[in-house]
Image: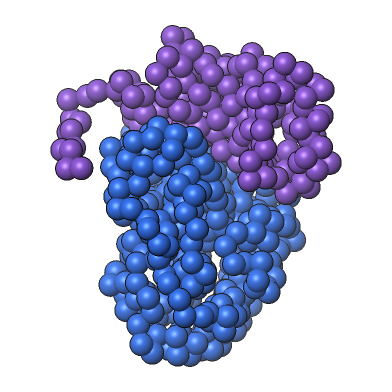
Chain colours: A blue, B purple
Amino acid sequence: MGLDVESRRVVEVEEGGTVEELVVNVGPSHPSTHGVCRVIAHLDSEIVTKAEPVIGHLHRGIEKMAENRTYLQVVPLTDRLDYVGSMYANWAYCRAVERLASIRVPDRAEYLRVIVCEMQRIASHMMAIGSAGADSGAVTQFVYAFDQRERIIEHFEELCGARLTYNYVRPGGVSHDLPEGWIESLLAFCESHRKGLDMMDKLFFGNVIARGRMKGVGVLSAEEAVAWGASGPVARGSGVEWDLRKHDPYSVYPRLDFEVPIGSNGDCYDRGRVRLLECYESCSIIEQAIAQLEPGAIMADGVPRLLAPLPGDAYDHIESARGSLGVYLVSDGSPRPYRMKVRSPAFCNLALLPMLAEGHLLSDLVVILGSLDPVFGEVDR
Amino acid sequence: MKITDLRDHLCQVYPDLCPLFSIEFGDGVLAVPCGNLFDAASDLRDLGFDRLGMVTAVDQAEEFELVYRLQSRSMLAGIFLKCSVPRENPRVKSLVDLWPAALWQEREVFDLFGIVFDGHPDLRRIMLPEDWEGHPLRKDYRDERMIRRPDYI
């Protein structure tokens, strides 16, 4: 955090005296900002009176780039949106393409998509929970969470060769079938992951210091969450029951039995703990999906390399680890999308930061930002 | 109210728009003149569309098509609200008063398409630097750093 040169401003207060307002520039490259986010924080002593996020440092114009590539060539671009959860953007994009081109995806591919996306949810939440620990000074938590995350990434590496940008979900299906022994090792992971979650729940969410840092900090009411378009754990932490897997069921989710954990207070603690509880549900979804998985094709028949859907538009969305991730595609009949828009949950959730941070300590700003779990590849696009 | 009843209701309120209203895949599409956008959105909000999901625009040569996606938690349905703004001096009334979710999303459309939202309290660029010239998601946008991708296909 550096001091802005022109940052000292004298503010008159009513009682006749003056206080000095300090403007502190947080970021854009600082570990606590979870990527390249700059926050201009106006401080009254240590209390944030106004926090203004400045985004766009990672704006690569992915929506513009997509207009110049074929439908298949766009899939690797979607990896670079939410790089902590690439599978989601792959899937949301492919669903929009499939809707636009009326492609029916084989059952096995749908199950594989559900399995990898629930694994991705665990991996992404481990990042969120781990960095929530690092943000509030509990570095041990960070290491334990990343240990869990690493094991998922290893499974992904074995599955599709990549650790971060998977390019796994393709229009019509998925790119690879499961390697030998992969399912057994994934089931073993789910078993041990539950123990890891139990431990983290006690170690971090039960810890008196962590609770003190997160309880009652950055409170978001349910009405505000709805009005601001918040989604994912940010909305559910405030008690808003909104999960597209349940409320706009897609793929094979209706055949799977799971709960949607919700919080009650809408503070950083509830947002974090909702993520932890979701990981238990994800383990159970993975196990059910594996039990229902049957042999079959992993790619729809007759999907051409060069897709040229009929003119029209299509929107589809999925529940990513951050919330409702939607892709809006417009086709003009050519082999390239005429327009692609990504409805980014991280972008909408980050818009809450000025409201949530106001009146809290500067050190809490970092915890609040972390609890919104933004990934700047997706915020800036 | 169910999404299927919504059609009848909207046809009563906007009789001349009735043919433009369709329900596909459980998603409705309502195209309105841009002057009526705010009122239509306000009506839909009162009917139970309590979330503003997405705001975007599409460059359709002579005009920009503005696309709003509203969601209803009670009906478990989504609806697209569309309006066409002229390319010259594109202006439309902001929906920030209805949903604060529009605050950043409309800024993004302003930044990348140059559509001005009247009544928006903080209409500035959001993705690009303040001194950027032009609006990159317009199809006629050019700048000297752009490289034409070769036509391999």
A42 left or right, relative to B127: right
Residue at point 49%, 72% (across, down): A108
Residue at point 50%, 37% (across, down): A313
Front-most of A340 and A293?
A293
Q: Position of residue A132 (x, y in %)?
A: 50, 65
Q: Is residue A190 above or below residue B13?
A: below
Q: Position of residue A201 (x, y in %)?
A: 60, 79
Q: Position of residue B151 (x, y in %)?
A: 18, 38
Residue at point 72%, 57% (across, down): A241
Q: Is residue A203 something one can see in this rendering?
A: no
A344 left or right, relative to B129: right
Q: Is residue A152 above or below residue B125?
A: below
Q: Position of residue A113 (x, y in %)?
A: 48, 67
Q: Is residue B150 something one can see in this rendering?
A: yes
B118 left or right, relative to A93: right
Residue at point 42%, 72% (across, down): A297
Numbered circles on residues, count: 0
Q: In terms of image quadrants, where is residue B21?
A: top right
Image quarter hosting the C terminus of chain A: top left
A14 left or right, relative to A341: right
